[in-house]
Image: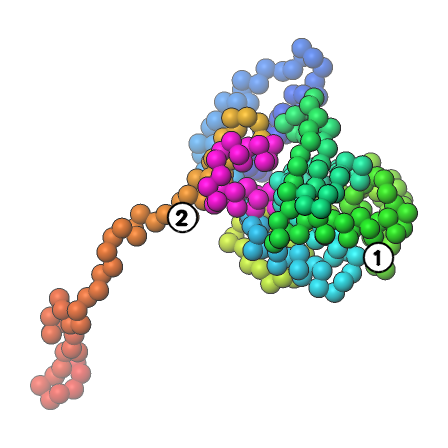
Amino acid sequence: MRKQLKVSTIKNYMSLIRTSMPPGQQPDHSLYLRLLRDYRTGNKRAVRKKQAFPITLPYLVAMMEKAEEDGRPIGWRDAAMFALSYRFLGRSSEGVDLEIEDLTVLDDRVVVWLAKDKTHQDEEQTVILHDRPDLQLVPRLRRWLDHLAAQGITTGPVFRHLHKNGTVATTFRTEIATVRGDSLRAQTVNARVKHWFKAAGLVADGRPVSSQGLRAGGATDLAAADATDEEIQEAGRWKKGSPIPRTVYVRPALAAKTDPFAKVPLHRPVSGQGRDKQDTEEPQNSDGGLK
């Protein structure tokens, strides 16, 4: 709190501390809750949550086309990754955890098998992603998978690190001994989103540009197209009854569509009407000069 951290950040830290304690030995947190309540009251900016800028289709298509512009494999990878993340409404960690065996690419759709996600920890899912002419998910994903197959890679992580010459860096992650192995890190996806957003000459509205914007963009497009709360919940695999689709996506989309002041007739003043001649002329001295 002395560091002026966001309330959500403090709550995340405290949750980690409590869950790390042995069962039945979690400390009483009533004092912490009281302090946090006082902190929220006296620090209004600490309560504000900055949502990611939604990367809706117009932004997404521009980013993918820019990534593919020079025909480099890294652009193929990023375009396929962005298209899948948008249509899948995937959380940042979900896309990079997918493996080739989890995907079935058909002519007009992609079938994704999920062992679990944040909401469904003990429930596997089969998610069907229908393609669209503007998204081109199937051809973009096939091109990337063909590039992997040409190098003998037909199993394991879908999205991987590449060398500058386009070959897959199969030992990239293991050389620096991380638990991610050959898989991309979520931070890498975040960096690629920022890179292509800027390279495409796009401008946000002050909200941060990040990989979360791909999920937010899909949900925002659904909300703008009058999808119901339940449809957005199902598409993004939010918990049933979650308030997030309505509060974060549906309400802002509805607000953007309607302007209550549009009901007020436009004021079209008649030239000179309502103004006194004395108010429209500069006061003058008796000799005609300005005072």
Residue marked by disc 1:
166
Identify the residue at image location x=42%, y=43%: 254
Q: Residue furthest bottom?
A: 287
Residue 278 lies in what quarter of the image?
bottom left
221 part of magenta stretch:
yes
Identify the residue at image location x=60%, y=42%: 215
The residue lying toward the viewer, choosing from 166 and 106, is 106
The x and y percentages for residue 109 are: 68, 43
The residue lying toward the viewer, choosing from 61 and 207, is 61
What is the three-letter code of the residue carrying label 1?
Gly
171 part of magenta stretch:
no
Left or right of 31, for residue 150: right
Q: Can residue 68 be seen in the rendering of this structure?
A: yes
Is 92 situated above or below 269?
Answer: above
Q: Give the magenta-colored segment's residue range.
A: 214-237
Residue 257 got which mark?
Answer: 2
Left or right of 182, for residue 193: left
Identify the residue at image location x=72%, y=15%: 22
Secondary structure, mark 1, is loop
Secondary structure, mark 2, is helix
Q: Quadrant of the C terminus?
A: bottom left
Give whichever of discs 1 and 2 has the lower sequence position: 1
Identify the residue at image location x=72%, y=31%: 114
What is the three-letter code of the residue carrying label 2?
Lys
